Amino acid sequence: MSNLIPAWVDGVLTPVDKLAAHVQGLRHQAVSVFVVRGADILIQRRALGKYHTPGLWANTCCTHPLWQESADTCARRRLQQELGITGLTPEYRQQIEYRADVGGGLTEHEVVEVFLAHAPADLHLDCDPDEVMDTRWINYADLQAEVAGAPERFTPWLKIYLREHAETILGADMLQS
């Protein structure tokens, strides 16, 4: 699989090596997916072998589209590759841009297409251990409380999503559950 992701170099969208984009802090495309089941959100703990933010909790799935891959195709591909999830229909929620230090001299400067997918009660997970070390379902209020109490356990982007974009991503009903 190619490690070339879409990044802006001198204002032009260009295929760039994923690690190079993070080392240089280049603005690049990304995809994030939140899978929900009723009032609960599926979060994942990133595998310890990940080159940045290992062992931290994140939303269901975060990734970069391959060069010339659409965001919705990317969302479905990574749900299947990381978590073994198939058959869901991710719904586009919004585009978010953020810049965050992710440690080790690496920077995420992402233009993220965010999706929400509704899961059935019997959703089966088959996680790739190179990507995901743990998963769990948690309601929004409990997740907010955990992030407030131990922010170092969560990825920078999840904290940004919850702090600045939760209602648009998850919907007002979920925030009140």
Image (spheres, helix red, strand yellow):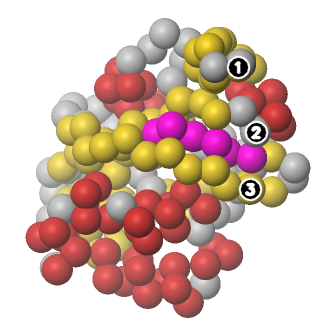
On screen, residue 22 above or below 67: below
Residue 109 within the magenta-colored segment of the rendering: yes
Per the image, the residue denoted by label 2 is: 25
* Between discs 1 and 3, the one toward the N terminus: 1
Question: Which residue in the protein does label 3 denote?
Answer: 101
Q: Residue at x 38, y 18 (%)?
A: 70
Q: Earlier in the sequence, mark 3 or mark 2?
A: 2
The secondary structure type at the circle numbered 3 is strand
Residue 168 picture location, percent across and down: 25, 57
Relative placement, left or right, of 32 versus 37 is: right
Q: Give the residues in magenta.
A: 107-112
Magenta part, dominant SS: strand
Q: Quadrant of residue 64?
A: top right
Residue 9, numbered label: 1
Q: Residues within 10 Å of mark 1 (few under 14, many from 20)?
A: some
Farthest residue to the front: give it.
11
Residue placed most toward the observer, 27 or 104: 27
Percent across and percent down for residue 60 are 42, 52
The kind of residue on which mark 2 rests is: Gly
Whether the magenta-drawn stretch holds residue 41 is answered as no
Do the residues bearing badges 3 and 2 touch, measured as CB atoms within 8 Å? no
Image quarter where the N terminus lies is: top right
Q: CA distance from mark 3 to mark 2?
A: 9 Å
The answer to whether residue 105 is above or below residue 134 is: above
34, above or below 19, in the image: below
